[in-house]
Amino acid sequence: MENSAIIKLTNLYKRYTVGNGEFIALKNINLSFGKGEFAGLVGPSGSGKTTLLNIIGSLDIPSDGTAEVMGQSVSALTAKQSAWLRNYHIGFIFQTYNLLPVYNVFENVEFALLLQKMSATDRRKSVMETLEWVGLTDKAKSKPSQLSGGECQRVAIARAMVKRPSIVLADEPSANLDSANSHHIVQTMKKLNQELNTTFIFATHDEKVMQHLDRIIRLKDGEVEQ
Amino acid sequence: MIRFILKGIVRDKGRSLLPVIVVSLGVMFTVFLSCWLKGIMNDSFALSANFGMGHLKVMTKAYARESDQMPNDLAFLGTDTLLTSLRTGYPEMDWVSRIRFGGLIDFPDSTGETKVQGPVVGWGIDLFSQSSHEKDRFNLESSLKAGKIHSKPGEALITYDFAHKFGINPGNKFTLFSTTVDGSMSFKNFIVAGTVRFGSSALDRGAVIADLGDLQSALGMENSAGEILGFFKNGNYDNNAATLVCQSFNLKFVNSKDEYAPVMLRLRDQGGLADYMDYVDTIGGFMLFVFVMAMSVVLWNAGLLGGLRRYGEFGLRLAMGEEKKHIYWSLIYEGLLIGTVGSVIGTFAGLCISAYLQKVGFDISGMLKNSTFMMHSVVRASITPQAFYIGFVPGVFSVVVGNALSGIGIYHRKTAQLFKEFEN
């Protein structure tokens, strides 16, 4: 596994104004993640996991400090540049799958590639290949409402992976799944991590996920626990 | 991408069917109200036009100056040529000759002596030509109180109030005393075919309606008429079209010094109607404006709520790497599409209802039984060119504005906030 840092967080703070006061969600975070890491941000609710994932995903910017993703400071990116970064380099997996209910499995996965203006033939090839990785080729025409929770999360993984991102950010991906499905999902992601050398960063407090992680970063009240 | 979004719109009933229904209904009501108000406005002028003014009226210049005195000695002589010329030159209008007159009618008793007599005003109208619509213009069938409509020359209708006051019944004979075109006294006997009540005390006090031919004969006006009236064939006054016809016709005689040269007047040029028509137009326009604004607010809110409902989807699209600007414009194009489709359907539906009510009308005679106000007992809608586009104002504009306003939130909220709403 290559260890060159593709994510570098230095003296990172995130503050929110609450009424007349201030809430500090992240305090002095100094972390880096290398290519192909399978790491997790672990901590209770409100510890800052999701905020940190949002900053890494360039959905938010730090109040202080720097967050460099793929060599680019997220604070310095324009809206267009940060969209481009997410489009080509970052995949998201969510706790509640967040599949678009009116589209079938194929279309949900294809959506990520539409933004890359890929040809229809290439899209089809990539989508079917990705569905094969997650074992859902036979469900390509099914709507999300016709799938189980585990299958939905596998579609979400396929959607995140179809564009071959460098980084996948997974926020509580197993929270809505039973242990068998949870195990299967993490195994799938681990396999993709190993085969494609994609960096996976989880936000989780699920022990079943933690046991598969190569690296665990514990957060408490917005700080990394030493 | 466009195909992908279109698929989403079609499949998501909350984004397509529901907004299209809401827009269609709003637009339908707007179009219908526009046609209905126009119809009511047209109706309010219809009686004035039908009884006295026409949509256009041609008189001699001398007659026009004193037209309120019905000066038949200044009437046209040889109207056939002028009528033919008008019918050929302006075929979009129905041209008819009329004689208005004043006189005295005398009802004899069984011995032939005068039983009662009284002053009347009257109309000589074309009652027996196949193509004549004069009976309809005077609404004779509905106004008939007793007896029947004229079936042959020599018969006349008199107003019910006059007949009732003097105990006159259908079948009674009377003599009309008036003056001929050259100022001599004229006499003509008529039989009362029936009695009519127009719902206007001014008319019902004492009026006679007889055939034009009878009046031409009685007043020495063979092939003559005091007035030639033009009516739009759809029955509705169109001031712009009337102005064009009027200007075109008057241009031919503008330099004529002949007192008997024809002059054409529009409905609004007569009887001080211009101010009243402007007032009604203003009030009608204001009512329509208020309604369009109200519908706009409703549809704007529909667009706004539709947009807000989808903040979660926007969050996902942002996470996938779509630009805010792209999402915002796709929302506006979606509003444009939904607004246009809804407006087309709503306009079509509104026009269909209006067309039906233009043809059939809505009978309010039950409400007018004791009314002395002059108005038609059947109110109709009127389809105007405006009806074809008025619905697009609330339909397209409001939905697009609603979507645009709801989309502003995409910019105002931080990306992570949208993302959070999506997660919730």
Image (cartoon, coloured by chain):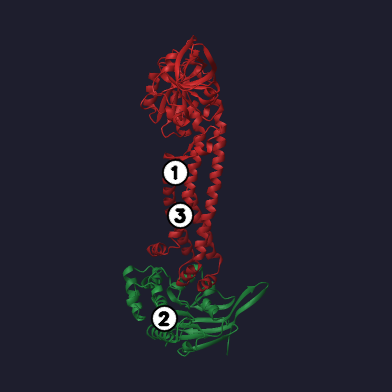
| Location of the C terminus of chain A (image quadrant) | bottom right
- Residue A207 placement, left or right of B130: right
**Which chain, by letter, is green?**
A
Q: What residue type is labelled 3?
A: Gly
Quickly name the residue at label 2.
Answer: A150
Q: Name the residue under label 1.
A: B354
The residue to which callout 3 is attached is B339
Q: Closer to us: mark 1 or mark 2?
A: 1
Residue in the picture at 54% in, 64% down = B409
Q: Distance between the residues labelled 1 and 3?
A: 21 Å
Q: Do labels 1 and 2 share a chain?
A: no
Res B254 seen here: no
x and y, in percent, of residue B328 in the image: 48, 62
What is the count of numbered marks? 3
Q: Residue at x 53, y 32 (%)?
A: B374
Task: Check chain identity for marks 1 and 3: say if they share one.
Answer: yes
Q: Earlier in the sequence, mark 1 or mark 3?
A: 3
Dot 1: element = helix
Q: Which amino acid does label 1 sit on?
A: Ser
Residue under the image location 47 percent in, 20 percent down: B59
Please state the chain letter of the residue tagged with numbered disc 3 in the rendered image. B
